[in-house]
Image (cartoon, grey):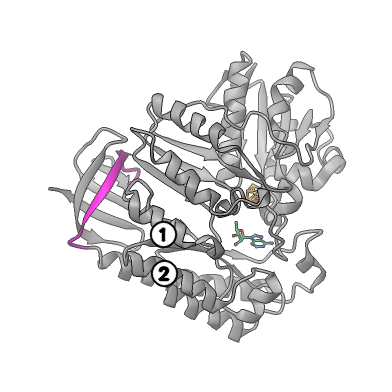
Amino acid sequence: MKFLVHTYGCQMNVRDSEAVEALMIAAGHEKVESEAEAELVIVNSCTVRQKAEDKAVGKTGYLCSTGKMTGLMGCAVKRLGADVFKVLPKLDFAVGPRAFGMIPRIVASNPHHVLELGDDLVPEGLDAHEVKGFQAFVTVLVGCDNRCSYCIVPDVRGHEYSRPEDEIAAEVESLVRNGVKEVCLLGQSVLRYGARDGKKDAFPHLLERLCQIPGLERIRFTSAHPSGCTDELLRIYRTYPQVCRHLHLPVQSGSDRILKEMGRRYTREEYLKAVRKLRDFDPEFALTTDIIVGYPGETDEDFEATRSLMEEAGFDNSFVFKYSPRPGTRSAKLPDDVSKEEKERRNQVLLADQEARGLARNRKLVGTVREVMAEGPSKRNKARFSGRDGGNRIVVWEGEAVPGTIVPLRIVDAHAQILIGETI
Ligand code: 5AD
Ligand code: SF4
């Protein structure tokens, strides 16, 4: 069949969709670029906030009405369960986030209302790739054993399962043989790799093993929790230049009271200690974060604490989300008492703060030389080339390079989200 996968949500979902594409191609199906051409469309859904779920479900409803075979995969399926066919009566099949490996078999069975929730399965097909360029995502840990009060992810993605180190190494070696230069290792709380199996520092050790692979020039990973910023991880940063000096370290709030209610298992000070550890090691270490505004009971004072934490941490970039109660989570039992307008106001304040902070931080890099991995012509200005430094900062310059090669560039100008470079 001619098929297409539409993806909503996080990088995990991007990766799962790619695996589904590879599995479908291996089963003899043909991936097409446009919806009009497709005989089968699969929507990979998110449910982290209600809006995310509504978007994916809305799109799926529309696709069902076109008469094409339609499937839904991902987090919203697990949340909706058998109700998915009440919401989407014309849907042909639905698979949970750990069951995407079953899709080719389901498609072959000419499905009608087939549901595979997948529970806590060891997912199949995790290593299926359709290599398209020099960058690849590699899932190392699925599921999440944290129980943050607001988060639906543990309910929908299930318990943590860390893939065996040998399997991951073999996958990365094969990617590198196929031209990949940069991998991004994925896990909801990726530094917990191996933790459920009682292994200490399993993640730094996995990194060290991957650093032995010749031709693999860059290793990134996401997302992190401050408890994983161990001395052993610092040793890996210090020893291996391939390991990019960037962490996405979601903090969610700067108020100790809210952090406690959220069950984040760190205080503001403990979080900032992890930040100082990384920045003492390398002042240019890039840090990005996620923030939730309008958590139940969040006062102006709590919000100001978040603002000041963000300034102290000096985030290079941040993603701000308005609190959305998710069914079945602990915080859903609390009144969602910060008004829509106030959530929006707090969101805007943090975005403006970040814009100013990002600009100030980027300006400090003017005059420095960054090692930039070339990606391709800049999207905004095709006459320029674009790439990223180790800190995941976008750098554009006048010139050209082979995508996937590393070019040293001198930074001559800075914007909040972009650095301007010059070849040396
Ligand atoms: N409401 C708003 N944002 C949320 N996130 C997770 N759950 C919720 C929720 N219920 C945000 C967190 C997380 C990011 C992926 O999504 O900031 O880090
Ligand atoms: Fe990713 Fe969470 Fe959305 Fe699932 S619910 S797609 S894990 S962000």
What residue is shown with label 2? 277
Residue drawn at x 37%, y 72% is 356
Q: Which mark is residue 200?
A: none
The residue positioned farthest toward the bottom in the image shown: 301
The residue positioned farthest toward the left in the image shown: 424
- Residue 392 percent coordinates (x, y): 38, 52
Q: Nearer the viewer, residue 211 or 44?
A: 211
In the image, residue 376 above or below residue 274: above
**Is ligand 1 within 8 Å of the beta carbon of the residue shown at mark 1?**
no
Q: Sequence order check: which comes first, mark 2 or mark 1?
A: 1
Give the extent of the magenta segment.
Answer: 366-381
The kind of residue tagged 2 is Lys
Could you tell me which quadrant the N terminus lies in? top right
Q: Residues within 10 Å of mark 2 (few under 14, many from 20)?
A: some
Residue drawn at x 37%, y 51% is 244
Q: Is residue 67 left or right of residue 220?
A: right
- Assess whether residue 377 is covered by the magenta stretch: yes
Q: Quadrant of residue 317?
A: bottom left
